[in-house]
Image (cartoon, rainbow, N blue to C red):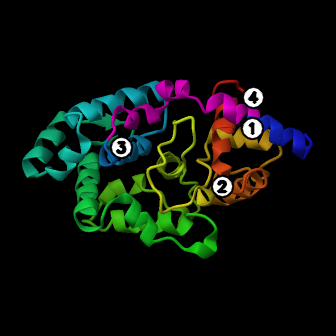
């Protein structure tokens, strides 16, 4: 496909899927339950972390988690203590390989971020390296900080490590939610200190397969090298907001079986 036609095609599909109607069937519907910034950040981070597998199951478990937290994730996190931890462990939350002991660590670590490091955005921002042209170092640095609160054990596998060539799909999706902002109102655009131009594609099976069929990606593995290759291709079409095309690539793969 000629580049001009490919640009028009991606723009059309981006506009088609970047609609409020997209929210209901997507994990982003969980943070959209809230209006307070911290509630959105916490709900978004946890639901993004468990976003693999069946989408319906992800959303169901997201609602279950918010119920655990009394529909007030920030208040729950900030008041979390040993008694609350014992209650949470007893309830036995599980989503695939993410279980209640992982959730306990996440809550303790998130509480630490807000009490001591000014929250999620500040931690990502503190690890940014402008030379990279993306958020690889910020994601890696965030992971190091998040896993330093206490020995994380098995929970560490749920934190992306792009420095080890992980595609970091779920954390890139979370960053898209927090950083991107447009008139459609699907992404939140809460974070103003990070440019959308630095975001990377939340590369998964759907977006990767579609990108290869469209000639945007040659690498066969869905890893960080593939993320950077696809990022470079998408920045040709919109260098200031390249990851908006995640809607097009994911929608074509997940809903149209392109």
Labels 3 and 4: the sequence-earlier one: 3
Q: Quadrant of residue 204?
A: top right
**Pointer 3 local density, CA inside 10 Å: few below 14, some 14–19, many at least 20:** many
Residue pictured at 56% horizontal, 57% vertical: 166
Which residue corresponds to mark 3? 40
Whole-angstrom CA distance, mark 4 to mark 1, is 16 Å
Labels 1 & 3 near each other (Cβ < 8 A): no
Residue pictured at 36% horizontal, 68% vertical: 145
Residue 129 visible to the viewer: yes
- Residue 147 vs residue 126: left or right? left
Which residue corresponds to mark 2? 227
Residue 19 inside the magenta-drawn segment: yes
Q: Position of residue 22 (x, y in %)?
A: 55, 27
Whole-angstrom CA distance, mark 1 to mark 2, is 20 Å
Labels 2 and 4: the sequence-earlier one: 2
Whole-angstrom CA distance, mark 1 to mark 3, is 28 Å
Q: Position of residue 78 (x, y in %)?
A: 18, 52
**Pointer 4 local density, CA inside 10 Å: few below 14, some 14–19, many at least 20:** some
Whole-angstrom CA distance, mark 3 to mark 4, is 32 Å
Labels 2 and 3: the sequence-earlier one: 3
Residue range in magenta is 12-35
Which residue corresponds to mark 4? 258
Residue pictured at 56% horizontal, 60% vertical: 195
**Pointer 2 local density, CA inside 10 Å: few below 14, some 14–19, many at least 20:** many
Whole-angstrom CA distance, mark 2 to mark 4, is 20 Å
Which residue corresponds to mark 1? 11
Outermost residue, front side: 183
Query: Which of these two is toward me, 48 or 31?
Result: 31
């Amino acid at each position: 496909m000629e580049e001009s036609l490919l640009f028009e095609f991606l723009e059309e599909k981006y506009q088609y899927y970047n609609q409020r109607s997209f929210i209901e069937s997507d994990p982003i519907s969980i943070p959209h339950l809230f209006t307070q910034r911290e509630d959105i950040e916490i709900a978004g981070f946890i639901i993004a972390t468990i976003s693999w597998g069946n989408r319906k199951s992800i959303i169901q478990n997201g609602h279950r988690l918010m119920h655990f937290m009394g529909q007030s994730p920030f208040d729950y996190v900030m008041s979390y203590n040993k008694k609350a931890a014992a209650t949470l462990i007893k309830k036995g939350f599980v989503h695939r390989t993410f279980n209640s002991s992982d959730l306990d660590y996440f809550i303790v670590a998130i509480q630490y971020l807000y009490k001591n490091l000014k929250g999620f955005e500040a931690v990502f921002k503190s690890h940014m390296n402008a030379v990279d042209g993306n958020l690889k170092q910020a994601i890696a640095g965030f992971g190091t900080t998040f896993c330093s609160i206490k020995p994380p054990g098995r929970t560490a596998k749920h934190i992306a490590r792009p420095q080890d060539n992980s595609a970091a799909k779920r954390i890139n999706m979370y960053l898209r939610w927090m950083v991107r902002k447009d008139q459609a109102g699907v992404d939140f655009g809460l974070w103003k200190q990070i440019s959308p131009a630095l975001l990377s594609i939340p590369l998964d099976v759907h977006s990767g397969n579609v990108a290869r069929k469209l000639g945007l990606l040659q690498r066969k593995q869905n890893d960080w090298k593939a993320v950077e290759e696809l990022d470079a291709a998408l920045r040709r079409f919109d260098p200031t907001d390249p990851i908006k095309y995640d809607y097009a690539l994911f929608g074509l793969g997940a809903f149209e079986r392109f």
